[in-house]
Image (tube, grey):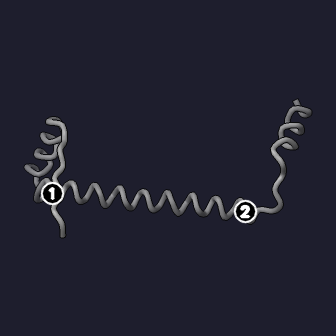
C-alpha cells in the first residue's frame, strides 16, 4: 500500500470527519479509499456499456452515409 497526500476544502474535511465520527468509516483514509473504489467501479461499468454500444452498432448492419439520412429526414418533413 502507498501513502498519498490529498488536500480538500475545509467543508469536505468537516463532512468526512462527521462520517468518521458517526462510525460510517474507521478513518478519513478509509472514506477516501472507498470513494475511489466506487468511482473506479462506476467508470468500468460505463466504459463496458459504451464498448457494448459500439459493438452493437458495428454489428447492426451496413452503415448509411449521414448525407442520406439528412436528405431522407428533410424530405419527410
> For residue 62, what is the image quadrant?
bottom right
- Give the vertical position of 29 relative to 9 (above or below): below
Q: How many marks?
A: 2
User: Outermost residue, left direction?
Assistant: 21
Residue at the farthest right position: 75
| Mark seen at residue 58 | 2
Q: Is residue 37 left or right of residue 12?
A: right
Can you name the residue that lies furthest to the bottom here?
Answer: 1
Looking at the rendered structure, the secondary structure element under dot 2 is helix
- Pointer 1: what residue? 29
Q: Residue at x 11, y 55 (%)?
A: 23
Furthest residue toward top = 77
Q: Quadrant of the C terminus?
A: top right
> Residue visible at 49% across and 57% down?
46
Residue neighbourhood size for the residue with mark 1, other residues' Cα within 10 Å, grouped as few (<14), some (14–19), many (≥20) = some
Sequence-wise, the earlier of marks 2 and 1 is 1
The Cα–Cα distance between marks 2 and 1, rounded to whole angstroms, is: 43 Å
Q: Does 7 appear above or below 27? A: above
State the residue in front, 39 or 25: 39
Residue 48, given in percent of the width and then of the height, sits at: 53, 63
For label 2, the crowd category at 10 Å Cα-Cα, with few meaning under 14, some 14 to 19 and many 20 or more, is: few
- Residue 56 placement: quadrant: bottom right
> Which image quarter holds the N terminus?
bottom left
Q: Position of residue 21 (x, y in %)?
A: 7, 49
Per the image, label 1 sits on a secondary structure element best described as: helix
Residue 27 x/y as whole percent? 11, 56
> Is residue 21 found left or right of 65 in the rendered image?
left
The label number, if any, that marks residue 64 in the structure image: none
Residue 26 to residue 6: above or below: below
Is there CB contact under 8 Å for labels 2 and 1?
A: no
Q: Is residue 5 left or right of residue 50?
A: left
Residue at left 72%, top 62%? 58
Amino acid at each position: 500500500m502507498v501513502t498519498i497526500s490529498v488536500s480538500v476544502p475545509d467543508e469536505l474535511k468537516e463532512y468526512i470527519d462527521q462520517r468518521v465520527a458517526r462510525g460510517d468509516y474507521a478513518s478519513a483514509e478509509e472514506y477516501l479509499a472507498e470513494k475511489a473504489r466506487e468511482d473506479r467501479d462506476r467508470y468500468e461499468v460505463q466504459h463496458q456499456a459504451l464498448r457494448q454500444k459500439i459493438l452493437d452498432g458495428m454489428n447492426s448492419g451496413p452503415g448509411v452515409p449521414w448525407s442520406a439520412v439528412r436528405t431522407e429526414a428533410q424530405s419527410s418533413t
